[in-house]
Image (cartoon, helix red, strand yellow):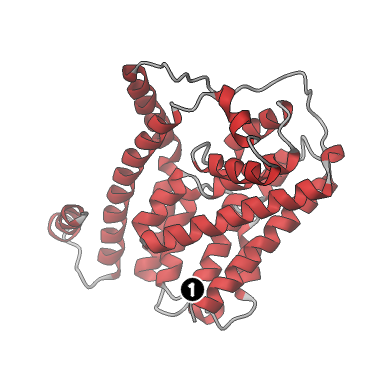
Amino acid sequence: MFKPVQLFADWLVYSLLRLGRETLAGGAADFFVFETIKIFILLAGIIFAVSMIRSYLPPSRIREIILRKSRFSGHLWAAALGIITPFCTCSAIPLFLGFIQTGIPLGVTFSFLVASPMINEVALVMLFGMFGVKIALVYAASGFVIAVASGLIIGWLNLEHLLEGFDLSKRIQNVAFGTEMPRAERFAYAREYTKDILKTVWPYVLIGIGLGAWIHGYVPENFLARWAGPDKWYAVPLATLVGIPLYSNAAGVIPLASSLTEKGVALGTTLAFMMAVTGLSLPEFMILRRVMKVKLLLVFFGIVGAGILFTGFLFNYLMK
């Protein structure tokens, strides 16, 4: 599918720029050009398709869908909704608050909050492009389970009294779509939404791929595997702790994770790092502190962190 892109990258790097095929600079540059073009093609196509699907989901139906049958199914629907809604924590939090204000239980809203930055369409597209369909599905399934389990536990603990700092009378509304929206308007919305997302994520994509290209070309083989291989018990918690102070969305962290795996870092360790950066970051803690007491934040981070650690250890064990 992407062979023409690879041929173009080879021509640009090795023929036009005259970088040697066997040089570190040549390998890094070829990786950067190929991955950049491939990822942007995938992003544009998939985001457009997902935004078209989203335009058929009236916000008046969201609450009914989430709470249609049972509290458990509400968690499943909320986590699924996170996949096709905002791709980073900062844009997910207003929807999170809006769900609470419309009467959706706290635990269900947390399922959405965990899933949204961790397993949205941008993450799935980039995972597919860099790791293949199997790893993309493994990551999505792991994130989905963590989101649902976290919401169920928080809901079971009845922690609504630990919310603070926002006025329930001020409702945050979702973007309004209607099932009778003309097709031309749907295409216009999808086109503009795709442009907006690409304008937002392109710096992260370039930075992430740039770091990945540097690791690809200049970091010695097996260097990272010495401390992050599957036989290192501390690799998963270390990767999780390293990821927490960082802030990025999937567009920035996945290219880096791809290069880490290529250099010998175990898959479970890589997944734990990605999940910590996208779903358990320190900036997220600071933003959520405005509407939650510290105790609720610690419970939330502890539950999600335990899920991330479990996922990392499990996949390192299975991939031995």
Residue closer to the observer: 71 or 219: 71
Quadrant in which the N terminus appears: bottom left
Does residue 44 lie above or below 132 as drawn? above
- Residue 228: x, y in percent? 54, 76
Q: Farthest residue toward the right?
A: 161
Instruction: Answer few, some or many: residues within 10 Å of disc 1's Cα (few below 14, many 20 plus, some between 14 and 19).
Output: many
From the viewer's perspective, tell me whether residue 245 is left or right of residue 156: left
From the viewer's perspective, tell me whether residue 278 is left or right of residue 105: left
Residue closer to the observer: 104 or 42: 104
Residue 23 image-quadrant placement: bottom left
- Residue 262: x, y in percent? 40, 70
- Residue 105: x, y in percent? 74, 37
- Dot 1 falls on a residue whose secondary structure is loop
**Residue type, mark 1 in image:** Val
Residue 172 image-quadrant placement: top right
Residue 43 image-quadrant placement: top left
Does residue 186 lie above or below 268 as drawn? above
Quickly name the residue at label 1.
265
Q: Residue at horizontal 60%, vertical 73%?
A: 313
Q: Residue at horizontal 64%, vertical 51%?
A: 148
Q: Farthest residue toward the front?
A: 69
From the viewer's perspective, tell me whether residue 190 is left or right of residue 285: left
Q: Is residue 280 visible?
A: no
Q: Residue at horizontal 49%, vertical 39%?
A: 84
- Residue 195: x, y in percent? 37, 30
Q: Residue at horizontal 59%, vertical 33%?
A: 65
Q: Is residue 5 visible?
A: yes
